[in-house]
Amino acid sequence: MDTAEEGRIYKCLFTGSVTSLLTLPLDMLSTDNLLADCLQGCFVVTCTLCAFISLVWLREQIVHGGAPIWLEHAAPPFNAAGHHQNEAPAGGNGAENVAPEQPANPPAENAVVGENPDAQDEQAEEEEEENEEEDDAGGEDAADANNGAQDDMNWNALEWDRAAEELTWERMLGLDGSLVFLEHVFWVVSLNTLFILVFAFCPYHIGHFSLVGLGFEEHVQASHFEGLITTIVGYILLAITLIICHGLATLVKFHRSRRLLGVCYIVVKVSLLVVVEIGVFPLICGWWLDICSLEMFDATLKDRELSFQSAPGTTMFLHWLVGMVYVFYFASFILLLREVLRPGVLWFLRNLNDPDFNPVQEMIHLPIYRHLRRFILSVIVFGSIVLLMLWLPIRIIKSLLPHFLPYNVMLYSDAPVSELSLELLLLQVVLPALLEQGHTRQWLKGLVRAWTVTAGYLLDLHSYLLGDQEENENSANQQVNNNQHARNNNAIPVVGEGLHAAHQAILQQGGPVGFQPYRRPLNFPLRIFLLIVFMCITLLIASLICLTLPVFAGRWLMSFWTGTAKIHELYTAACGLYVCWLTIRAVTVLVAWMPQGRRVIFQKVKEWSLMIMKTVIVAVLLAGVVPLLLGLLFELVIVAPLRVPLDQTPLFYPWQDWALGVLHAKIIAAITLMGPQWWLKTVIEQVYANGIRNIDLQYIVRKLAAPVISVLLLSLCVPYVIASGIVPLLGVTAEMQNLVHRRIYPFLLMVVVLMGILSFQVRQFKRLYEHIKNDKYLVGQRLVNYERKSGKQGTSPPPPQSSQE
């Protein structure tokens, strides 16, 4: 009921009518639309809880990482060390922090320093402007800082433990007979209502009134996301209002109000930046990928507009998902480049592996214009890469191979499974299976290194791209000595500078080198330009190969099986990718075996042939039979009862059932590995630990494949036998037979789920009964040593009375 009340309060606040406010008490006691209101209330309460946890975590980030300079410029004089310590992160992270501390090297410094002079000038100007106000505000802010520090330090752990012990599940749910449960319900409803009022109602109506006043209401309504856009506009206006009020409070010397307004502005700023980084940027990338690949699927912008009008939420989510996948794989490739290239080459990209990199601290300290500049630069870089590796190759393919495109991504109109399942199959099974292979990553790394070496020697940029080996060794030795010297010098200041300074000192000891020195050749800018051109040509050729070779190989192989029938290109692409991977793997293995002689090669071929036969058998059982049975069972239990009426006959597509079964099998395996210890988890862990080279066919068939296939076959056959063999013998009508035949699978699933829930509740009530009995009647517990009588008899001779006992 609590969640239902939250849902109804939420709808009442956003209805915008006086009638809804007057009828709110009666609506809260009504039973109409109870399930829908409960679900909406659960969502609202979850969002409220997540937002509250995020606020607490952001406060910890501000406390431990330091507030921005403009918020803490009037710190007390005796806290100068902590003040300078809090200023350090404001200059940026990554290469921007490392560069000024490096030894002088003009060629590398020009590349690495980049925007450090601007940041230092900005900090100097801000410090000069803010130092004028420190004399007047020092005393009051010092008292505020002392009070804040006392509040943070004077907390009693015993009181929190005592409160946690008193707040039990029995008291929260009202099972102990007290009325504290009603008090908890009242406080939860009140706090959630206040939270919704402050963080959702006010920003929404601020944005709504602003959009109505500016005349943009019709454009916002046409976007199908009126509530979200209106709320974001309200938060933007609220942030502008907060920063203006903060400036006015600074002018009139209202120091407490100034700090409160500044903290509120930081909260709104970080929230908006998180929405932009996680929501808006992947969405832009997804839409740009879709627009640049329209010709590849023989689609137009009108088709995308129609799909958006029919299902706006699903369309936006799919584009966001595609954008997130693109950003993830791009970041993974950048991490691989950092392993190959000289440190300092990619100075303009943030290093995600840097221990000092903290995006939340950057959001707190860096100004908005720098975040806006990074966002625009990221959009330009990612958009240019999409143009280079997707749009331009498609144009070239259409001109050179007119009949190769478009890709066939259309399924039958009456198919119960959309192409979304196939896309998930490719993203969740095919690509991870290829990219998680150590050999595939090593091949890609080797190709990048070979290209880098080739480009370095052709353009005389080997020292710039990879560094000099001798200089690297000397710099490594020098770095070790410098680390020892720095460790000795930093031993005393760490004691007095607090936990943050000690943490930073530990991270800087033996940390990664920001850059390595290199030799700068003549005409260096021209060579860098030629390097960029060479890189663009290489990426274009690689994209052409990736778009044509796997699909061509998959179509050719699939033609032997399906003939001239059109197949979804995800299947052909997946088949082609695996064939290419197996071919490259076989060639590399043979090249590695060639120096060992013919006899060793024959022996290896024999061993690998046996291993491949075992792997094929296991794959047929675990990747073929089990997913097919699982997908068919899911079709009978969930899909067919929901989508096919009783007067129609359901059609089954084994190929698509298998595709969905693969996803279900992967999800079930992941849940099993995360769950408690039982026989299936033990068997899966053992199979995974053995690997492919030490595969035990008998163990897998006997312990894993046979039990799982038996359970699935029983789940499929027993209901069918009951519906088709036993029910007709009872003399029921044909309509009843059809009803039983179509609904027996979900009915038996419901029975099994109810039995599981009942058994779980019985165990929980037994535990609760034992717990209450022990609380009421248990006097004490005593540990008694366990001693075996046989041990006593073995250590000492038995007494003469032992026979009488």
Image (cartoon, rainbow, N blue to C red):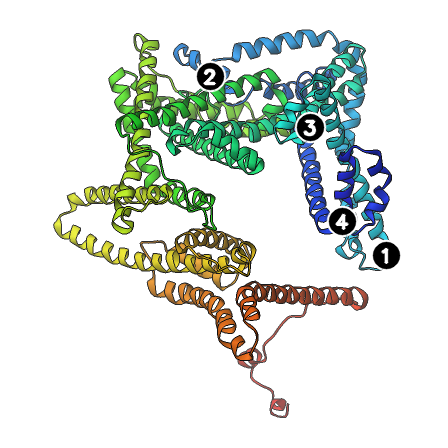
Question: Would you say 212 lies left or right of 286 here?
Answer: right
Cα–Cα gap, marks 2 and 3: 46 Å
Q: Name the residue under label 2.
A: 102
Q: Mark 3 points at which residue?
A: 231
Q: Earlier in the sequence, mark 3 or mark 4?
A: 4
Q: Where is residue 676 in the image (x, y as percent from the top left)?
A: 55, 58
* Residue found at x 86% / y 44%: 25
Q: Earlier in the sequence, mark 1 or mark 2?
A: 2
Cα–Cα gap, marks 1 and 2: 66 Å
Cα–Cα gap, marks 3 and 1: 41 Å
CB atoms of marks 3 and 4 within 8 Å: no
Q: Position of residue 22 (x, y in %)?
A: 87, 39
Q: Which mark is residue 607?
A: none
Q: Which mark is residue 164?
A: 4
Q: Earlier in the sequence, mark 4 or mark 1?
A: 4
Instruction: Identify the amino acid type marked 2.
Output: Gln
